[in-house]
């Protein structure tokens, strides 16, 4: 009895409650997106949240070593899926989905987590001296580079960049020496023209549209223009639940997925949008605090990776709908309608909860 | 070892610093998002709000014209007239009251229009258009259009209004349409954007709603920077609803309705002094005249009364086509096309003779003596009588401690079954009903089309009641008594039928082979009915008896035969109020001297021509006195008209 109580006290309640709050916000938004109806989205969203709760519960009780032990296998599995996708996948314009047992599944989402875990394991196995040597980082770059390449050729620029950023975050958090960071930044900038030449036309168009959105109001700039109108007309308090004219009259595209933040902004205004950002802030802060508390490097690094993954989802999405970034197609975690991304975020939170409970375990315990 | 520990501690410190740096970076970027949102939603709110308002007029739905209804000769029963609507978008208006006053100075606005518009505004999001007036004339449209640059938030839209050129004459057939209510919008959210769309509520309009409605189109209005329309692009062409042709004939319908309304009374001009005087005192007459009907009658006692109310059906005995369907009083379905005024609604609802009720399918009447064919058929089939079986009528039938009277106090003497139908002898039927039993009568009635809906293409049809033993036990928890069989034998007591069911019964007797069912949409496809399965010998007895009613020397409708073609029929006089023993001893008061509500219903069913039956008719005149004096002559005139029309 006391044991159960002590276990309960060790759970990261702030994180869990904030997660629940986002799920609730998401279902209400999806309810509004279908003009005040539970189907087709809000209901499904809640079902997936229930599945997510199961995932978190399972991961809470996994032995700490388990994630460590299986992380390479996990990445290998993710790579297999990405390769299979190239062979049998489908999607509009790009191959992003495969169907497994009747569910459409987007392998690039869990790949993000697999990369984080594999990198966390690899780097936590290196001694402090080894971390000073350049060669140690070549396998690390390969661990993130290969999946990055596979997602990039789908082609899915947005997700591949997010995957890359997540991986680099883990390397950065592991304590890579500053001199390598500077080197990488210079190399990255130098390769930009090469990357640009490799982009598909529609990707180039998106970037150009982003740089000059007013030039093309009814084409690629349409979504962003309408999104800004919806957000801007929401004002401080919004137009009221189910009263957003942009959203309810279908000017706003994809309001159940990528543009859900816009719809909330139209109906609940600046107050509503900032409230959501605050909830994310609570989640991210909780994760970083847990990372700081962990006594082993694997847990620390995976927490930092998860935190960056959630942050990137959120940041890219909000920056996109507010016109700060080109349209890349990133969901708003736990709020947007979309199964794979949502379950991936839940799995990430599960990893953090597991780390939180096992924060006392030291590096040597894994060996 | 010590060095290693130190190094590890150092790394842990670096990692913590890096974690904090990442956290700080996230917070900073989050701050950028908040700043961006502030810029969009607070600083630039006003300009985006304007853009959002303008957006709503980018695209809109175009109402499809509703399918039209025609009679068998291609005459229009329900159509659409082009109108212009005055629309306002509340979110674009600074001061709604001021705007409405302003509009009111240019075109007339009734207080009810304003009240209704405000109610709609309070119920829906303010970015949706609200109809202020839905029937602008060309002149009003022109006057408003000139001023439209200064009337912010006002727009016009061409739309359609449902019109019924035949008015009350076909009101129960066509039914009516009315504006969509909240439940309709919930079922079909498109209706929110089509403020002028109408939904069928009764009659054919309701029955064929999905067929008549059509598919709405989409158009895009290109607007300039000041929100004024520049040009219109049609994204999707609207698709008109399907036109429907009905089997009724408006000419016959009009003749039948006028004939029923006049009854057997003299008509009085409305301007006549006596009529004006009567209007002051007589509430019923006033209720009637206030609906816009000018027909006033002078009855046999010299009293001024409204037209007769009741129902008439004429149907084809071979294919079931309904040629005439009159239910009087009717109403003007045009009233409902625009939101109904409270005054009109009150008039219709408080009218003593329920004009909204379609008596043909929803009015329930005891069939009275028109039920006697059923009893004869059941008795013959059961073998309890033969065509030769005779009974003596002395004017009454003693059963237990009660006496059941015949309508003829002096009695009919000793008569057979054909004579019993001819003279409608009640005593004869008391006896054969008892011998046959209620369950067998019930069975026969159902086979002839009574006691169940006929399946005509109209909503709201009533089943009626044809009792049997188990029915009484189930519905009243009491045992069926033989006395109730006696009463049912003359179509009174529990028995209730609709005028349409009586027409179907008559059509089946006339047809003799098939269980004809009625229909309003005649297509040229041949119809197939279930076989009637009543022996031809029995049908012949019924037809012979019905022929004797109009042609026999003592027939109850002997003065109302159709020369040449010959009509077979049966009268019915249905007692509405029980006559007590004292009243009977004092002498029964004549119908005409009783209050209208207590007079007998007058019924007649018949078919013609006798040799080659073509049409069946059923006539019910509410509180019309007697079948032979009131219903039979009406039926004869209408049937003659329809037959003559066929020849021409």
Image: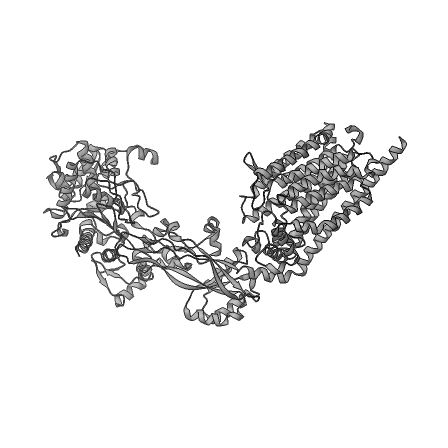
Q: In this view, does B396 lie above or below A245?
A: above
Looking at the image, which is closer to me, B231 or A160?
A: A160
In the rendered image, the quadrant that contains the N terminus of chain A is: top right
At which x and y percent is residue B606?
19, 47
Looking at the image, which is closer to me, B516 or B637?
A: B516
At which x and y percent is residue B528?
25, 41
Looking at the image, which is closer to me, A152 or B218?
A: A152
Looking at the image, which is closer to me, B282 or B440?
A: B440
At which x and y percent is residue A276?
67, 48
At which x and y percent is residue B127?
54, 58
**B334 relative to A353 in the view: left or right:** left
From this viewpoint, is residue A187 visible?
A: yes
Q: Which residue lies furthest to the left in this view?
A: B553
Q: In this view, does B3 lie above or below B218?
A: above
From this viewpoint, is residue B587 visible?
A: no
Numbered disc total: 0
In the rendered image, the quadrant that contains the C terminus of chain A is: top right
Which residue is painted at 75% across and 34% down in the image? Answer: A122
Q: Is residue B386 above or below residue B84?
A: above
Q: Quadrant of residue A230?
A: bottom right
């Amino acid at each position: 009895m006391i044991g159960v109580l002590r276990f309960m006290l060790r759970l990261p309640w702030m994180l869990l409650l904030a997660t629940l709050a986002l799920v609730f916000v998401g279902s209400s938004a999806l309810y509004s997106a279908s003009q005040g109806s539970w189907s087709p989205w809000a209901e499904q969203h809640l079902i997936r949240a229930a599945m997510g709760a199961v995932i978190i519960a399972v991961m809470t009780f996994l032995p700490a070593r388990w994630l460590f032990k299986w992380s390479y296998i996990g990445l290998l599995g993710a790579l297999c899926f990405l390769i299979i996708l190239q062979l049998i996948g489908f999607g509009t314009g790009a191959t992003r989905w495969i169907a497994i047992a009747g569910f459409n599944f987007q392998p690039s989402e869990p790949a993000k987590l697999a990369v984080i875990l594999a990198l966390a394991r690899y780097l936590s196995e290196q001694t402090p001296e080894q971390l000073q040597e350049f060669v140690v980082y070549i396998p690390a770059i390969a661990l993130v580079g290969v999946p990055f390449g596979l997602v990039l050729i789908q082609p899915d620029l947005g997700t591949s960049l997010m995957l890359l950023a997540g991986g680099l975050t883990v390397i950065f958090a592991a304590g890579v020496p500053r001199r390598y960071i500077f080197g990488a930044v210079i190399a990255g900038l130098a390769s930009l023209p090469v990357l640009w030449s490799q982009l598909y036309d529609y990707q180039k168009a998106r970037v150009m549209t982003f740089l000059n959105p007013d030039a093309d109001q009814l084409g690629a700039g349409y979504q962003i223009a309408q999104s800004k109108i919806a957000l801007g007309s929401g004002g401080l308090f919004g137009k009221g639940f189910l009263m957003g004219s942009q959203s309810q009259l279908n000017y706003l595209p994809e309001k159940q997925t990528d543009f859900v933040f816009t719809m909330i902004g139209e109906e609940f205004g600046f107050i509503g949008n900032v409230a959501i950002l605050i909830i994310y802030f609570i989640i991210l802060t909780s994760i970083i605090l847990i990372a700081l508390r962990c006594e082993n490097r694997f847990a620390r690094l995976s927490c930092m990776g998860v935190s960056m993954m959630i942050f990137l989802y959120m940041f890219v999405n909000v920056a996109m709908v507010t016109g700060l970034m080109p349209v890349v197609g990133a969901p708003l975690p736990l709020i947007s309608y979309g199964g794979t991304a949502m379950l991936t975020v839940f799995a990430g939170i599960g990893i953090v909860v597991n780390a939180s409970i096992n924060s006392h375990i030291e590096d040597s315990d894994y060996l | 070892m010590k060095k290693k520990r130190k190094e590890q501690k150092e790394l842990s410190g670096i990692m913590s610093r890096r974690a904090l740096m990442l956290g700080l970076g996230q917070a900073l970027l989050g701050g950028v998002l908040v700043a961006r949102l502030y810029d969009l939603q607070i600083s630039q709110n006003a300009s985006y709000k304007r853009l959002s308002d303008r957006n709503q007029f980018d695209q809109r739905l175009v109402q499809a014209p509703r399918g039209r209804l025609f009679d068998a000769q291609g005459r229009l029963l329900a159509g659409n007239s082009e109108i212009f609507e005055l629309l306002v978008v509340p979110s674009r208006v600074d001061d709604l009251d001021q705007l409405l006053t302003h509009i009111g100075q240019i075109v007339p606005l009734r207080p009810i229009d304003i009240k209704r518009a405000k109610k709609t505004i309070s119920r829906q999001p303010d970015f949706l258009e609200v109809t202020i007036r839905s029937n602008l004339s060309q002149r009003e449209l022109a006057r408003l259009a000139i001023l439209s640059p200064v009337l912010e938030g006002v727009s016009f839209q061409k739309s359609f209004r449902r019109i019924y050129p035949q008015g009350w004459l076909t009101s129960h057939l066509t039914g009516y349409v009315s504006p969509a209510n909240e439940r309709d919008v919930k079922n079909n959210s498109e209706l929110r954007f089509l403020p002028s769309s109408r939904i069928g509520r009764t009659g054919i309009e309701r029955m064929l709603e999905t067929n008549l409605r059509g598919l709405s189109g989409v158009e895009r209005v290109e607007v300039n920077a000041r929100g004024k329309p520049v040009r219109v692009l049609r994204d999707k062409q609207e698709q008109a609803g399907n036109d429907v042709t009905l089997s009724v004939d408006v000419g016959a319908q009009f003749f039948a309705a006028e004939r029923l309304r006049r009854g057997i009374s003299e008509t009085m001009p409305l301007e006549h002094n006596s009529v004006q005087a009567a209007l002051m005192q007589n509430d019923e007459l006033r209720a009637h005249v206030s609906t816009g009907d000018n027909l006033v009658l002078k009855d046999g006692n010299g009293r001024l009364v409204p037209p007769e109310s009741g129902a008439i059906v004429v149907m084809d005995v071979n294919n079931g086509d309904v040629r005439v369907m009159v239910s009087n009083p009717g109403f003007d379905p045009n009233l409902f096309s625009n939101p109904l005024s409270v005054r009109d609604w009150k008039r219709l609802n408080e009218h003593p003779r329920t004009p909204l009720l379609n008596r043909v399918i929803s009015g329930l009447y005891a069939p009275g003596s028109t039920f006697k064919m059923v009893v004869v058929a059941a008795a013959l089939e059961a073998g309890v009588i033969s065509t030769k079986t005779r009974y003596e009528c002395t004017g009454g039938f003693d059963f237990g401690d009660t006496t059941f009277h015949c309508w003829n106090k002096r009695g009919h003497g000793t008569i057979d079954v054909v004579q019993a139908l001819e003279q409608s002898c009640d005593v004869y039927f008391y006896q054969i009903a008892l011998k046959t039993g209620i369950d067998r009568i019930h069975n026969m009635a159902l086979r002839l089309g009574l006691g169940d809906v006929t399946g005509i293409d109209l909503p709201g049809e009533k089943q009626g009641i044809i009792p049997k033993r188990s029915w009484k036990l189930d519905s009243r928890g009491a045992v069926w008594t033989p006395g109730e069989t006696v009463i049912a034998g003359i179509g009174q007591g529990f028995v209730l039928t609709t005028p349409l069911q009586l027409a179907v019964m008559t059509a089946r007797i006339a047809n003799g082979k098939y269980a004809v069912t009625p229909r309003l949409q005649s297509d040229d496809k041949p119809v197939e009915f279930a076989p009637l399965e009543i022996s031809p010998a029995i049908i012949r007895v019924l037809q012979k008896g019905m022929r004797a009613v109009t042609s026999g020397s003592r027939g109850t409708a002997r003065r109302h035969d159709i020369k040449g073609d010959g009509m077979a029929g049966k009268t019915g006089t249905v007692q509405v109020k029980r006559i007590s023993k004292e009243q009977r001893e004092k002498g029964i008061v004549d119908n005409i001297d009783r209050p209208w509500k207590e007079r007998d219903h007058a019924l007649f069913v018949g078919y013609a021509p006798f040799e080659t039956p073509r049409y069946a008719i059923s006539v019910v005149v509410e509180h019309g006195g007697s079948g032979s004096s009131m219903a039979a002559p009406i039926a004869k005139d209408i049937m003659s008209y329809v037959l003559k029309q066929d020849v021409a």
